[in-house]
């Protein structure tokens, strides 16, 4: 490739002058309240918590923390809005409100991207090019479904469920809010959304958008808080459906607590995806796919390609190429447009990654890490490979949720399929080969919900996403993403 | 009337294409509605259930890999074999308390239901699949796949129609099953196992246990190699127990409360879709 060296970069050493995104026109308020019934309200008990920028450890805002009383107010507001307004409104009118949300996100996309990077630590390139446009696209896609629900279930009618309680994670805060809210509203439900504790801010911007879009009060309520807030929402008797994205451990607690209740439930949980490279693959492209698969969003991705399987004949070549490519990755300021790997989302997550990798080494794994100079403040983890691991290794079986790739080799197709499926998870997988028949042989046999062939970590509102086995149940995206918010009558 | 002594049938379990007695050696005496001895029924144990899951797991990939057309023909073959056993099924139902007319109607409805679902085997995919218009240069499509090993808790009544209505939509997509038969009316379930056995259904695809629901339910819903549970019944405690234990490995749980009827109200594409996963595959388009 003939790249013209950037005037400020040192082409020989590959260092770049900083190119930070300006934050000048983004105004983060010092304090965000709860968004209930179309109003900003303090928590009943006045509780607040601080939210930080994980790249600097500085407090960037305070956020009201919802207790049981607040959860109850939010659910009541959603119930009233459902009964009095949203349920009675035509699909066409509902759709128009959702289109408005899509448009308003597009208009404020730069602000959303910056706040997302400041609050969550992800590189601005990703929040700008992936999270924000996909969030807008998700609302736009589902808006159009609102007046077409009679086509969802052939020969049967579809009916909305009522109040949906939705709990989302910190890895794609705005995008996960969009994945949850858009299909719920299109299907005719009202919503109480609880963002993750470490990343409340873009959801509060979304609350502004929802108010500007003039949605009837109570149709969407957004309340921040920790696990107790989530539990209060899950256990609230007047909620009809719970949608949760997060860890498998918490997913199991939710599934257990909903047992025997009429509440519907969808879970999008952890993963430990097999990413398979056959020796007849285009290796340069595969290496880009591996990098994108595990280092995208610091590896804070439930569908991350965290278990690499390379066919023996090309293993040394691929691992060598991968190391060379990793050495060019830039870890640092999430707001810098050169940055490939941003900040780890929180101190506890950094501790968890560190501990898990240490255990991988204790069990005999060999470590390869980039040697980026890490900033003094903030939470950082250099991109990491672990080789010399076995199927039973801790770092092969457990989800790390960080920029850490466990590498194994294989000889035959049957062997790699068996190894790929030897996990309690089943969210995603990847296959690299130039042999088309082999692609479908392998993708058919991997027990997972999303398979990327000669590509990885692609997302689209029209494309259903969700897991097999302990990666959860239900789909988000596409027409299948409407099923969890409707019942067949 | 001849003086010939009739041959009584021994009712056993159906596991992995074989008819073993329960490993526990336990039985319960089943009496007719009039109080006459009918048979000793096996009380399946936790170990029998585990064996059944192992058989179902082993049979899964072969059953899933059969063509949909082939699975449809095998389901149709079940209907053919049931038709030949109409008298026997009907007698078993009357022995257990149904009138002759009720029994005949239930057997006929069970056979027709099997034919109905046989026809779905190579069609439901076309209604549940999508080609997705993604905004990047990829060919992207979503198709249904079977969930794996499914436990079926059949309703007490109707004992044959309930079992067939609950099971057919689950196996036609490629799942394998372990069925717990009606506890109070278990006869037809085992005869149905014999039908399955003579219908080209590979051993292990359908496994049938008789026994005590309260004893087996906790094991059946907590087993770590079961992917999903289909529960038919209205007992709130049982529902809660099934749901809670299922969470241990994030099993999919579907509850059915509607009694299975002879009309077509229970025949639905959506019973099939209750036990499939949706898999989405991406591939780049370009040169």
Image (cartoon, rainbow, N blue to C red):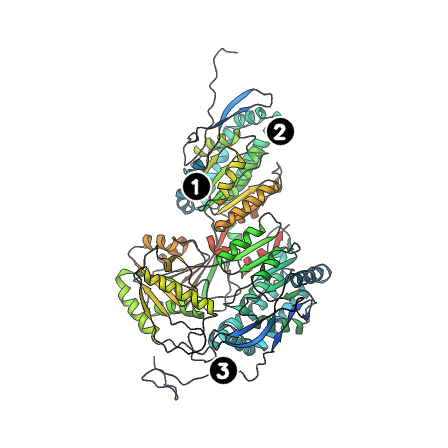
Marks 2, 3: nearer the viewer? 3
| Chain at tag 2 | B
Residue A332, given in percent of the width and then of the height, sits at: 42, 77
Whether labels 3 and 1 belong to a single chain: the reply is: no
State how far apart marks 2 and 1 are (Cα).
Answer: 34 Å
- The answer to whether the residue labelled 3 contacts the one labelled 1, judged by CB atoms less than 8 Å apart, is no
Circle 3 is placed at which residue position?
Answer: A21
Asked whether residue A185 is in view, the answer is no
State how far apart marks 3 and 1 are (Cα).
Answer: 57 Å
Label 2 crowd bin: few (<14), some (14–19), many (20+), radius 10 Å: some
Label 3 crowd bin: few (<14), some (14–19), many (20+), radius 10 Å: some
Residue shown at the point (34%, 55%) measured from the top left: A391
- The answer to whether the residue labelled 2 contacts the one labelled 3, judged by CB atoms less than 8 Å apart, is no
Res A365 quadrant in image: bottom left
Work out whether residue A197 or residue B68 is closer to the camera in this orientation and state it: A197
Residue shown at the point (55%, 59%) measured from the top left: A244
Circle 1 is placed at which residue position?
Answer: B53
State how far apart marks 2 and 3 are (Cα).
Answer: 77 Å
In the displayed structure, does residue A81 sit left or right of residue B32?
Answer: right
Res A7 quadrant in image: bottom left
Asked whether residue A240 is in view, the answer is yes
Circle 2 is placed at which residue position?
Answer: B102
- Whichever of labels 2 and 1 marks the residue nearer the N terminus, that label is 1
Mark 3 lies on a secondary structure that is: loop
| Chain at tag 1 | B
Residue B27, given in percent of the width and then of the height, sits at: 48, 27
Label 1 crowd bin: few (<14), some (14–19), many (20+), radius 10 Å: many
For the C terminus of chain B, the quadrant is: bottom left
In the displayed structure, does residue A409 sit left or right of residue A75?
Answer: left
Work out whether residue B265 or residue B221 is closer to the camera in this orientation and state it: B221
Looking at the rendered structure, the number of numbered marks drawn on it comes to 3
């Amino acid at each position: 490739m003939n790249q013209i060296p950037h005037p400020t970069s040192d082409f020989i050493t590959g260092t770049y002058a900083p190119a930070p995104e300006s934050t000048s026109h983004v105004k983060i308020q010092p304090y965000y309240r709860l968004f209930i019934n179309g109003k900003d309200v303090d928590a009943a008990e006045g509780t607040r918590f601080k939210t930080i920028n994980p790249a600097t450890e500085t407090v960037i805002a305070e956020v009201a923390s919802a207790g049981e009383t607040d959860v109850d107010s939010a659910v009541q507001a959603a119930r009233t809005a459902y009964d009095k307004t949203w349920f009675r409104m035509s699909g066409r009118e509902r759709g128009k409100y959702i289109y408005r949300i899509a448009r308003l996100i597009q208009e404020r996309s730069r602000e959303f991207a910056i706040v997302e990077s400041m609050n969550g630590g992800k590189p601005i390139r990703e929040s700008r090019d992936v999270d924000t446009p996909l969030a807008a696209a998700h609302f736009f896609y589902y808006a159009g479904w609102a007046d077409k629900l009679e086509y969802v279930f052939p020969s049967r009618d579809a009916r909305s469920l009522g109040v949906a309680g939705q709990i989302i994670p910190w890895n794609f805060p705005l995008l996960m809010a969009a994945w949850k809210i858009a299909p719920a509203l299109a299907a005719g439900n009202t919503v109480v959304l609880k963002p993750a504790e470490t990343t409340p801010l873009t959801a509060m911007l979304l609350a502004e958008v929802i108010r500007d879009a003039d949605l009837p009060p109570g149709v969407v309520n957004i309340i921040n808080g920790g696990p107790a807030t989530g539990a209060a929402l899950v256990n609230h008797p007047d909620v009809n459906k719970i949608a949760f994205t997060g860890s498998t451990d918490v997913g199991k607690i939710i599934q257990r607590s909903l047992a025997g209740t009429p509440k519907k439930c969808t879970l999008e949980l952890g993963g430990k995806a097999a990413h398979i490279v056959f020796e007849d693959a285009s290796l340069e492209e595969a290496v880009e796919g591996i990098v994108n698969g595990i280092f995208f969003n610091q590896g804070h991705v439930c569908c991350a390609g965290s278990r690499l399987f390379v066919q023996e004949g090309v293993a040394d070549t691929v691992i060598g190429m991968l190391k060379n490519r990793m050495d060019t990755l830039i870890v640092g300021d999430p707001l810098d447009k050169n940055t490939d790997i941003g900040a780890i989302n929180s101190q506890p997550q950094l501790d968890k990654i560190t501990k898990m990798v240490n255990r991988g080494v204790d069990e005999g794994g060999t470590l390869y890490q980039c040697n980026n100079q890490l900033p003094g403040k903030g939470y950082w983890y250099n991109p990491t490979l672990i080789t010399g691991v076995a199927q039973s290794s801790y770092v092969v079986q457990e989800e790390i949720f960080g920029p850490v790739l466990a590498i194994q080799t294989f000889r035959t197709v049957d062997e790699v399929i068996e190894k790929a499926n030897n996990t309690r998870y089943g969210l995603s997988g990847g296959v690299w080969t130039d042999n088309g028949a082999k692609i479908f042989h392998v993708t058919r046999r991997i027990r997972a919900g999303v398979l990327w062939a000669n590509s990885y970590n692609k997302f689209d509102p029209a494309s259903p996403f969700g897991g097999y086995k302990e990666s959860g149940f239900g789909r988000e995206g596409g027409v299948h993403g409407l099923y969890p918010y409707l019942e067949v009558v | 009337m001849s003086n010939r002594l009739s041959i009584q049938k021994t009712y056993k379990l159906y596991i992995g294409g074989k008819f073993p007695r329960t490993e526990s050696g336990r039985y319960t005496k089943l009496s007719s509605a009039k109080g006459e001895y009918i048979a000793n029924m096996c009380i399946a144990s936790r170990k029998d259930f585990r064996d059944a899951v192992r058989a179902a797991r082993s049979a899964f990939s072969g059953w899933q890999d059969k063509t949909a057309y082939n699975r449809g023909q095998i389901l149709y073959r079940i209907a053919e074999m049931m038709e030949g056993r109409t008298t026997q099924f009907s007698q078993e139902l009357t022995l257990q308390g149904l009138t002759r007319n009720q029994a005949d109607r239930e057997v006929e409805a069970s056979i027709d239901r099997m034919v109905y679902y046989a026809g779905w085997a190579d069609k439901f995919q076309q209604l549940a699949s999508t080609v997705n218009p993604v905004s990047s240069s990829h060919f992207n499509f979503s198709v249904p796949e079977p969930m794996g090993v499914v436990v079926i808790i059949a309703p007490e009544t109707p004992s044959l129609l309930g079992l067939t209505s609950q099971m057919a939509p689950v196996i036609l997509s490629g799942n394998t099953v372990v069925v717990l038969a009606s506890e109070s009316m278990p006869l037809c379930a085992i005869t149905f196992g014999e039908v399955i056995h003579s219908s080209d259904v590979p051993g292990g695809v359908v496994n049938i246990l008789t026994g005590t629901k309260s004893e087996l339910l906790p094991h059946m819903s907590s087993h770590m190699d079961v992917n999903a549970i289909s529960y038919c019944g209205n007992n709130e405690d049982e529902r809660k127990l099934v749901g809670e234990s299922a969470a241990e490995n994030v099993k999919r749980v579907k509850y059915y409360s509607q009694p299975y009827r002879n009309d077509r109200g229970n025949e639905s594409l959506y019973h099939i879709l209750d036990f499939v996963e949706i898999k989405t595959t991406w591939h780049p388009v370009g040169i």
